[in-house]
Structure formats: C-alpha cells, structure tokens
Image (cartoon, rainbow, N blue to C red):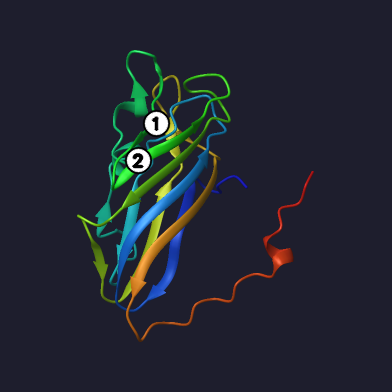
Amino acid sequence: NPTQGSLHTLIDGVKGKGQYVGTYLAWRVNDNCWWGEGEIKFYMDGDREYPTICGTGTEDYFCGSYNFENQKTRQYQEFTTPYAGMHQVIRPDGLYRAVTAFGLYRWHILDPVRFDKDLKVTIQDLGWRHDGRYNNQKSDISSTTFWYQAEPHTKFPALPSKDGLEIPRW
C-alpha cells in the first residue's frame, strides 16, 4: 500500500527505556525520478515537533551516497557491509524507473541509539522531480525494526489475526 502523506512510520508508541538496534526496508518506488531524499527521524524522550536525530536522506542513512549508483554502468549498485547495505535491487528497466524495488538495512551497533522514555522513528518518502523540485512520492514501503527494551514498558499491541495480515489478490 502506498505511503500516505509521503511519510512511513517505522515504529511508534514505544514507552520505557531501550536501544534501537536496526532497520530493514523493502522499498518499491512508484515514480520515474530519484527517490531517496527522505530524512529518517528519531523522536525520543519527549520529542514532539523536532526529532533528536534527523538524517540527511535515505541514501545517507543506509551509507550509499550518490544515488546508490555505479558511475561506470549508470545503474543502481548493490553493496553489503556488516552494518549497512542495499543488498537487493529489482530493476525493471533501468535507473530512475517506476517499480524499481530495493532491499536496505542498517544496524546501529557502532552508533547506538538509546532512549530513556519513548521512541518513534519515521522516514520520509521524498525524492526529486526532473526539474529539481521535491517530489512527495507514494512508494510501497515495508519495514522491520529491531530494538531492545528494559522493564517496565507499555504493553505491546495484539498481533492481527491471520486474516488481518492477508493481502487481497486483485
């Protein structure tokens, strides 16, 4: 399901003390433009309007600058490291084409993100139009987050039923 309002929430409603460990994103772009300009934001310990940590863009957060592009082939380039990477690219028809999909990960081992009271993490679904203006996209993003949490903490929400998790076939 496409993002609404060009924002994807990775995690919200975490109360208590803990440590954010990592992010995995499966991201399918539905536009024919550069897609990775969105900032990741860590709202913690009472932040409301402004986050404690605000990234400079999706490509920077996942440690793959310059469009994740191989300058020789002019194609997206997969890469893997122990702590960050873009391990998968599904290329329907080349660079900056709709329905290109990516698998991205980032582990916060050497750069821990610790919180004492609460945590919310979002990432913008933001890119550039061909004329240099921002593009509020509607990508399909699926995410998994990992964190440790100390007791006491708020109760985790109930998981949906198997029918609630099913994606209807069209």
| Picture quadrant of residue 10 | bottom left
The disc label shown at residue 78, or none? 1
Label 2–label 1 contact, CB within 8 A: yes
Q: Which mark is residue 48?
A: none
| Quadrant assignment, res 161 | bottom right
Q: Amino acid at mark 2?
A: Gly
| Residue at the image point whose x is 57% and y is 33% from the top | 30
Q: Report which residue position mark 2 lands on.
A: 85
Percent x, y of residue 118:
34, 73
Residue drawn at (39%, 31%) of the image: 78
Percent across and percent down for residue 123 are: 41, 49
Q: Residues within 10 Å of mark 2 (few under 14, many from 20)?
A: many
Q: Residue at x 27, y 56 (%)?
A: 108
Residue 9 at x, y = what percent?
46, 56
Q: Is residue 38 or residue 59 the one in the foreground?
A: 59
> Taking 4 as reference, is 150 left or right?
left
Q: CA distance from mark 2 to mark 1?
A: 8 Å
Amino acid carrying label 1: it is: Glu
Q: Position of residue 143 (x, y in %)?
A: 49, 53
Secondary element type, mark 2:
strand
Q: Is residue 167 left or right of residue 111?
A: right
Instruction: Please tell me which residue lies in front, 126 or 113.
Output: 113
Is residue 78 shown left or right of residue 17? right
Q: Quick one: label 1, few (<14), some, or many (20+) residues within 10 Å? A: some
